[in-house]
Amino acid sequence: MKQVVAIYLLALLLAFASPVHAAYGMKYASLDVHNLLIASDETKFASVDIQKILTLSYAGKEAKAKLGSDVLKVEMEKNSREKELNKLKVELEKQNVLLSETERSAKQKAYEHSLQEYQQFVTKTAEELRVENAELTKRIVENIVKVVQDYGRKKGFLCIFFQNESILYLDEKVDITGAILQALNAMETTDL
């Protein structure tokens, strides 16, 4: 991701530097690119905190509630199965001395089968929850991208990028997260 951002910024600087270089010569190109980026009213850059939008948007809150509900259901089922499994294990341990070899073997196989079913359930539901989370997040992010692109076009931005750990410094004046959050929430309420 860091490389992609660096490549985009380099390409952007080169795009600005080429006309400056041709007009003023190489010696002033970097200075003029810097001045062009800072002083020009036409050049607008902005950033969006996607994690904040995922957390605070109506769709994000709804997705979190749905996922939380699903996790709660899975936890209840998991606890119920775990309780039954522990009950079988205690029963097997208590009756271990009293049972014949075939009965002990049959109960041991039943316990092992239940344990295997429990482990498969835990693995399967964890994967299902991961997939559900990914799908919900993907849908919201797609809507965020649409809103950002529309907002950028309407407001005349040259570049809007997502904030992440690869950005070393970012002035808060270029953060348009609030405006994007508002636009996304407005879009979601009109879609209802």
Image (tube, rainbow, N blue to C red):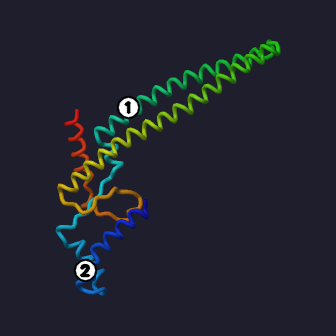
The disc placed on residue 20 is: 2
Mark 2 → mark 1, Cα distance in angstroms: 53 Å
Q: Quadrant of residue 83?
A: top right
Q: Secondary structure at mark 2?
A: helix
Question: Does the residue at mark 2 contact the one at mark 1 (Cβ under 8 Å)?
Answer: no
Based on the displayed image, in which of its 4 quarters is residue 100 positioned? top right
**What residue sits right under mark 1 in the picture?**
66
Compared across the picture, whether 189 is left or right of 30 comes to left
Q: Earlier in the sequence, mark 2 or mark 1?
A: 2
Residue shown at the point (22%, 41%) measured from the top left? 187
Closest to the observer, 144 or 55: 144
Label 2 sits on what residue type?
A: Val
Residue placed furthest toward the right: 101
* Residue 77: mark: none
Judge left or right: residue 68 versus residue 19: right
Image point 47% across, 38% down: which residue?
130
Relative to 5, residue 128 above or below: above
| Residue at 82% in and 16% down | 101
Q: Please report the residue visible at 79 percent of the width from the left and 12 percent of the height from the top.
A: 99
Q: Residue 15 at what x, y percent from top left? A: 29, 72
Crowding at dot 2, Cα within 10 Å, few <14 / some 14-19 / many 20+, comes out as some
Please tell me whether residue 73 is drawn above or below residue 50 in the rendered image. Answer: above
Task: Pick whichever, 86 or 74, lies toward us.
Answer: 74
Left or right of residue 147, residue 135 in this image? right
Residue 5 percent location from the top left of the image: 38, 63
* Residue 96 on image: x %, y %: 78, 17
Q: Quadrant of the C terminus?
A: top left
